[in-house]
Amino acid sequence: MSTADGEVDIHKKERMETSAEIWAPGGPVEDWTTDYDIRDQAYVEDPVPIWAEMRETCPIAHTERLGGSWNPTRFDDIRAMAKMVPELSSRQVLVMPGAPGMPEMSRYEQQIAAAPITADPPIHDWTRRMLLPAFAPKAVLSYEAYTEELCHELIDGFIEQGQCDGAVDYSQQIPPRVIAHMIGIDPGMADQFVIWVNGVLGEGLNDPELRLRTRDELLGFIGEEVAKRQSDPQEDLLTELLFMEIDHPEANITPEVVVGITNLLIVAGIDTTWSSIGSALWHLGTNPSDLERLCNEPELLPIAVEEFLRYYAPVTMARVADVDVEIGDVCIHAGDKVLMNFPAANHDPEHFEDPDEFIIDRARNRHVAFGSGVHRCAGSNLARLEMTTALGVWIERIPDFHVSDREPMRWAGGQVRGPRVMPMSFPAGTRR
């Protein structure tokens, strides 16, 4: 096991995190417990057996790649780490090093960059409270009709062809339009949102220049939209956030804070949910018995959604240690990065019976796909609504489909995992 006993040098305090050497892919992984690489194709395509190996032999694995990080795989360890606030700071939610040339940010700027997910208390507390009203169960229900109609319109666009790309043409089109609708931006921006999200969390994770350029474009766009609301308020969430009053002694709502929160909504709120929808469709398109079950028992859909979330949880957040932290016999030193591997926790046999088996009607399913602790996803109600609606409309309109082999499947990996190319085939239907 990688510990602080001297067997593995983990204290490289002179890390040049923007150097070309750190960004270099390196050679193939030979030992996942001491040299894992979240960019490795095996990890991207099927990380479950890798997590099992880690959990069995070294449940808190370590790597020196990408400047070094820790990768816990046990449910209990990850839950414990989620409670270590602010010892494990959220100001760096990516393990990927910063892009060369990226201006150095102050601690405050880091925290409001995508608050509340990048913030520690007390900034986290009041920025999260800004979002909660918009994502409360009753508020989220107001977007159900819009989402349902959107799903029908998307299917109308390809159902007569008898084929589509389930990722490009469907799953990744839904969250951008719903978020745009919420914050008061033209839903026609959806394709641009997809480009930006890919540049930040997709290809941009392996291309630092692309990530920096995309970040500047996205923040510039959001800044312009916020400035418009300052001079001409609208009936939308962006305006509501900008002029909100929070009863909190530390609250300091500025345009910069609203830009950061909107950045979170566009990037994290889009990529995570389209990955979940896409993974669920991939599962149904490759497991005909589960598809048949849902077609015959549509009342199972809400339960199935929880199993999709557990089994294919897309998000692995990161933390950076502000102080030395001990977990079991592992010492995580100040400055070390930690992957909050919630997807691996969802496959821990100590908490889930037959964890690596997809059980569509799993009765006990207390997964942590939305995280744990104070940083548990504030948008979970919306994500569930989008998933349930997207899958329900698809199964209603296209009950017989499969993932085809006309072109290779492609998965995104790193810290958000989901299908990015997913060819689907089905009997040609008609528009409504």
Image (cartoon, rainbow, N blue to C red):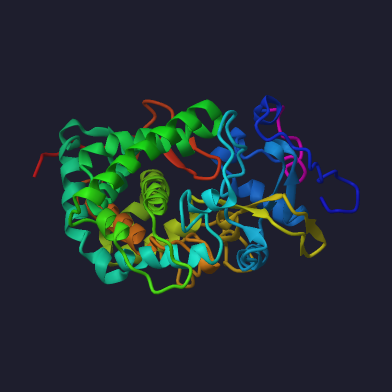
Residue closer to the observer: 7 or 115 = 115
Instruction: Determine whether, in the image, residue 279 is placed left or right of residue 235.
Output: right
Q: Is residue 290 visible?
A: yes
The C terminus lies in which quarter of the figure? top left
* Residue name at image x 91 percent, y 48 percent: 6
Q: Is residue 394 visible?
A: no
Side of 13 relative to 381 (left or right): right
Find residue 173 and report its image quarter. Answer: top left
Segment tinted magenta in the rendering: 26-35
Q: Residue furthest left?
A: 432
Query: Which of the pair 217/287 is nearer the observer?
Result: 217
x, y percentage for residue 171?
32, 44
Locate residue 214 relative to residue 81 in the image: left or right.
left
Which residue is drawn at the image coordinates 71% and 51% (left, top)?
54
Q: Residue furthest front?
A: 231
Give the percent coordinates (x, y) of residue 118.
52, 54
